[in-house]
Image: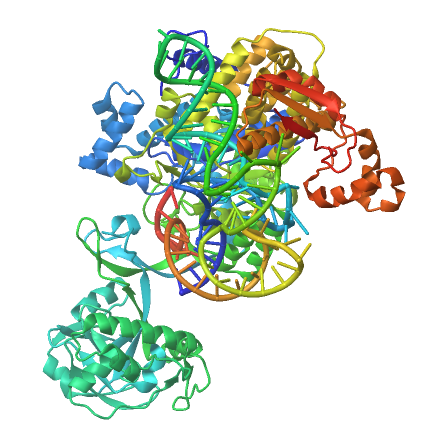
RNA sequence: GCGAGGGUAACAAAGCCAGGUUAAAUGUGCAGGACUUAAGAUCCUGUCCCGCAGGGGUUCGUGGGUUCAAAUCCCAUCCCUCGCACCA
């Protein structure tokens, strides 16, 4: 987008090059004077705003930039409202991504290499092969992109205090995390247990959604089967089911004629499962003494006992049984399973057991009805069977009641399911078998099964006492938008135990079990605390070689600590910083963080801190799309921040982010819309460049402009105080710009009004377009930094409502004249406007109140006319005659003809002028 | 399935929480005009329908309801988007 075109360079005061020079100039000066590195100042109120630290695995794009930009706008606004503002930033380096990128680069993975080549090109890297080679070391990737992000953020003019930065990989910080986990553990918030997860058999690694083929479009979840043991004479059959409550209706077992089965022994117990099931059981932590192959005919010989009911059942063959699914053995409940019913029917069976689950009589969802309705004939009608099964399971689950043929009569299916399962497992008659919700493989083709991790460490977010504390905290906090409060309550209720450590990845070792590395979301819940005193902690760390639990505890928990003398001062200083700054006043992030990071953030704060140290507010910014689509490499719509700043400017990007959408709604990066803002910025620059100081009295329209400006400024402040950034800046930037245009058309003098509002305007605009404001502040106002100015009070007497109303009135008259012209097609040569006669004006208050008795008899004849048109009259109490008289020139130039203004006199049996509604006559 | 958010004129997008001042901001697009040698840029006007006097009519996913009054509140229904855990 080139907006500095052609020969008319005077009109385009600044070109791209000059804009970026200006931005660079002020960025350098802010940095040199360290104006965004605030010090403790007990006499001032502090404001700590945080945005989640970026992960350092690549460059940032327009989407990432939004939240940080909004954060910076708020930080800058709070500064001009007098707060001592701290806006810190650090870098996240924990977890597996950086690690796996390094490994992929080491393995010469093509797509990774090309992606990172692209990133390096963006940053103008000279020695790309050399740099890529260094990326085989994870730390080098993290280091490189940390610096790149600092560079990006600097180019965007962010008022970040970089002096407090740290990373999650830094030893000093890891000592802090160790402290945190020891604290959690001492409160009993850490537990251990078995944990199922998706697992790649070939790679011998857990896998996430990203690793699974089509994992993003067709999600794989973990299902919990109840593997029920059916005792036989020599061994048990293990049939796995998602519906253990149906054991009361079992008629037989099914196995696959094509399956391969094994007899496995575990102590005295002997069980038969399919070969694939054997693999799963091993992954899920079962160990076996002996394993034998067993033939199908051997299995078919036996009779097996149904647990709980004690009924003896036979094994039958069925093609529909998938030996790879679950245990490869299925129990048959023809009264409540479409497939079992059909299979049994085909096999020539005619007697079917009674139903054990009742559903409302109105429902169509019984096996017989569904089979009939959908016309299912054989097991090969798989689509219809799947459909019927879905309907049946859903209805039985939601409205099914166990009947008198079971001991659980009257219980809902949902209740019965967990009761039966508990009973079976409790009595050793069943165990849990995990299975994937569909057959899955990794992108590299390895089979994905469910494995169980033994003794996984959890943070026990299910603790009710902890949840209660957290709910209280949420109640005390503010949320923008407000509906988030309820969502957070729900999210806290929904949290369960969270696995908090892994065997792989970068991060902090779990202090009580160093084989484990703390998982990357769990190590970043209360890290904003460290922004307050990172330099002090680092210095202590360097001095002492570690921080140690007691020292950290003394700072962040206010416990006593006998420090060595040489550390004493540093500890005191760290504590002072912590005490002054902490308590995050606003945390700003995006909605995907709600149910994880932010909920952990809230709960960990509730667990570890109290009082003023607790968070005060959370705001969520909406997602960013690009050209109408979700930002992604495959869409080809990734636009890097660096690229945006180069092609437009930081101020244009910032204005777009501020005004493009409300903070909580989605924003589309659309270059046409960006162009609109960039034009407006260009106009702003022209106005500022051509400004020269001017003094003098204000005429009517200039008064109007000043009043309008201050009423917009008022709105700006009240919006910004609630983070209504979009409204605020539409008002103070776009609308003021429009007012200026209007003023010019009305014959007002721009310089004379700018002179009066310059200070206010530049200060108010500076949070969004700080570079330009800084430039013109120095040019037109003073040598100090506008970034550090305070918004001054609105002058006495402003905004003047009656002036604003008067101008509204003039515009309404213009609208009326236009409408008449349109309706009649008259091109007037002369316009006569006659305002309300004094006599009518005097009695109007009585008419309006319905006090007709107070109206003098000689003018009572106006009452009927009033009754007829009263809905069209808007009360207006200005001096209409003088207003119109002083706007006469404007009216004349607008309509290109003579305009005559007069005071009307009351006329009987004809139309009269009313307050705010003069008579208009076109000739 | 569960939870949340949303469906507004050609398009994008406000308004809805606190019902009337809303035919409904704003931007884009489109049409006409001004300026200009011309183009671009800029500015003005118009952009649901009707109207020879400032007016009237019909609109805010669909269907009901509350109310003197509903885009705004309630109920039902259809559709769209997002989150649902080990992934940062």
Quarter where residue B41 is shown: top left
Q: Position of residue B34 (x, y in %)?
A: 47, 15
Quarter where residue A427 is shown: bottom left
Look at the picture and state if A818 lies above or below A786.
below
Residue farthest to the front, as pictured: A909
Left or right, A345 with reference to B33: left
Look at the picture and state if A401 lies above or below A351.
above
Q: Taking the image as drawn, is residue A843 in sight?
A: yes
Q: Position of residue A700 (x, y in %)?
A: 70, 17
Query: Could you tell me which quadrant the C terminus of chain A lies in?
Result: top right
Quarter where residue A307 is shown: bottom left
Left or right, A531 with reference to A625: right
Residue at position x 65%, y 45% in the image: A611
Left or right, A747 with reference to A180: right
Look at the picture and state if A533 lies above or below B19.
above
A231 or A714: nearer the viewer: A714
Q: Position of residue A518 (x, y in %)?
A: 40, 47
Residue farthest to the bottom, as pictured: A351
A9 or A394: nearer the viewer: A9
A558 or A39: nearer the viewer: A39
Look at the picture and state if A513 lies above or below A294.
above
Residue at position x 67%, y 23% in the image: A832
A612 or A746: nearer the viewer: A746
Q: Position of residue A710 (x, y in %)?
A: 67, 25
Query: Could you tell me which quadrant the N terminus of chain A lies in?
Result: top left
Q: Taking the image as drawn, is residue A43 in sight?
A: no
């Amino acid at each position: 987008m080139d907006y500095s075109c052609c020969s008319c360079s005077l009109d385009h005061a600044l070109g791209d090059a000059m804009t970026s020079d200006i931005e660079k100039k002020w960025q350098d000066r802010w940095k040199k004077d360290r104006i965004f590195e605030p010090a403790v100042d007990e006499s001032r109120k502090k404001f700590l705003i945080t945005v989640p630290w970026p992960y350092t695995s690549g460059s940032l794009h327009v989407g990432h930039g939004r939240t940080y930009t909004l954060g910076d706008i708020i930080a800058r606004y709070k500064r001009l409202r007098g707060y001592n503002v701290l806006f810190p930033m650090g870098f996240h380096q924990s977890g597996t991504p950086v690690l796996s990128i390094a490994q992929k680069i080491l393995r010469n993975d093509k797509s990774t290499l090309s992606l990172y080549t692209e990133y390096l090109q963006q940053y103008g890297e000279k020695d790309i092969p050399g740099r890529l080679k260094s990326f085989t070391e994870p730390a080098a990737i993290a280091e490189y992109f940390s610096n790149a992000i600092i560079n990006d953020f600097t180019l965007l003019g962010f008022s970040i205090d970089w002096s407090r930065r740290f990373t999650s990989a830094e030893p000093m910080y890891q000592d802090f995390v160790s402290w945190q986990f020891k604290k959690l553990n001492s409160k009993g918030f850490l537990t251990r247990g078995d944990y199922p997860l998706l697992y790649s058999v070939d790679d011998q690694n857990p896998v996430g959604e990203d690793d699974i083929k089509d994992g993003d479009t067709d999600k794989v979840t973990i299902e919990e089967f109840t593997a029920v043991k059916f005792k036989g004479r020599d061994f048990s059959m293990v049939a796995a089911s998602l519906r253990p409550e149906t054991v009361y209706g079992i008629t037989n077992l099914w196995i696959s004629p094509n399956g391969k089965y094994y007899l496995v022994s575990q102590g005295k117990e002997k069980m038969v499962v399919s070969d694939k099931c054997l693999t799963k059981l091993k992954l899920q932590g079962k160990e076996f003494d002996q394993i034998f192959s067993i033939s199908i005919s051997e299995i078919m010989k036996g009779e097996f006992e149904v647990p709980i009911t004690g009924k003896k059942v036979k094994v039958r063959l069925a093609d529909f049984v998938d030996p790879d699914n679950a245990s490869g053995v299925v129990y048959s409940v023809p009264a409540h399973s479409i497939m079992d019913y059909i299979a049994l029917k085909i096999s020539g069976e005619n007697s079917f057991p009674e139903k054990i689950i009742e559903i409302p009589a109105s429902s169509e969802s019984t096996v017989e009805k569904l089979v009939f309705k959908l016309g299912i004939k054989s097991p090969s009608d798989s689509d219809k069977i799947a459909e019927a099964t879905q309907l049946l399971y859903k209805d039985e689950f939601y409205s099914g009641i166990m009947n008198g043929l079971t001991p659980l009569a009257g219980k809902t299916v949902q209740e019965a399911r967990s009761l039966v399962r508990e009973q079976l497992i409790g009595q050793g008659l069943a165990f849990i078998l995990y299975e994937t919700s569909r057959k899955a493989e990794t992108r590299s083709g390895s089979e994905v099964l469910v494995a169980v991790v033994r003794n996984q460490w959890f943070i026990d977010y299910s603790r009710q006492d902890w949840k209660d504390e957290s709910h209280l905290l949420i109640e005390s906090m503010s949320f923008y938008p407000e509906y988030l409060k309820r969502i957070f309550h729900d999210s806290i209720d929904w949290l369960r135990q969270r696995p908090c450590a892994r065997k792989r990845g970068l991060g902090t070792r779990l202090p009580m079990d160093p084989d484990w590395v703390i998982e990357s979301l769990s190590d970043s819940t209360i890290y904003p605390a460290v922004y307050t005193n990172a330099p002090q902690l680092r210095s202590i760390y360097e001095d002492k070689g570690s921080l140690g639990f007691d020292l950290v505890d003394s700072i962040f928990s206010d416990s006593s600590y006998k420090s060595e003398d040489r550390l004493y001062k540093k500890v005191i200083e760290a504590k002072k910083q912590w005490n002054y700054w902490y308590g995050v006043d606003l945390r700003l992030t995006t909605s995907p963080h709600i149910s994880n990071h932010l909920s952990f953030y809230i709960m960990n704060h509730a667990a570890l801190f109290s009082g003023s140290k607790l968070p005060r507010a959370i705001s969520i910014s909406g997602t960013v799309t690009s050209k109408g689509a979700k930002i992604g490499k495959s869409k080809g719509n990734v636009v890097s921040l660096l690229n945006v700043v180069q092609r437009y400017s930081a101020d244009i990007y910032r204005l777009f982010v501020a005004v493009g959408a409300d903070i909580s709604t989605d924003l589309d990066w659309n270059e046409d819309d960006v162009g609109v803002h960039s034009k407006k910025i260009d106009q702003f620059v022209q106005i500022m460049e051509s400004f020269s100081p001017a003094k003098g009295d204000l005429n009517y329209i200039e008064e109007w402009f000043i009043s309008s400006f201050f009423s917009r400024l008022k709105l700006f402040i009240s919006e910004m105080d609630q983070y209504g950034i979009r409204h605020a800046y539409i008002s103070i930037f776009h609308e003021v710009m429009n007012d200026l245009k209007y003023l010019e058309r009305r014959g007002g003098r721009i310089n004379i009004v700018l002179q009066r509002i310059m200070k206010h305007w530049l200060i108010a605009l500076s949070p969004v377009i700080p570079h330009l404001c800084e430039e013109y502040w120095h040019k037109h106002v003073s040598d100090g930094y506008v970034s550090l100015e305070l918004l001054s009070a609105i002058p006495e007497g402003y905004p003047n409502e009656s002036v604003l109303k008067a101008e509204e009135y003039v515009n309404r008259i213009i609208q009326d004249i236009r409408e008449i012209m349109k309706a009649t097609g008259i091109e007037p040569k002369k316009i006569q406007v006659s305002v309300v006669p004094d006599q009518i004006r005097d009695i109007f208050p009585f008419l309006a109140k319905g006090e007709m008795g107070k109206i003098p008899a000689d003018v009572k004849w106006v009452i009927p006319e009033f009754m007829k048109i009263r809905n069209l009259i808007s009360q207006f109490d200005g001096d209409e005659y003088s207003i119109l008289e002083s706007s006469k020139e404007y009216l004349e130039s607008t309509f290109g003809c003579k305009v005559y203004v007069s005071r009307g006199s009351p006329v009987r049996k004809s139309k009269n002028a009313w307050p705010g509604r003069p008579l208009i006559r076109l000739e």
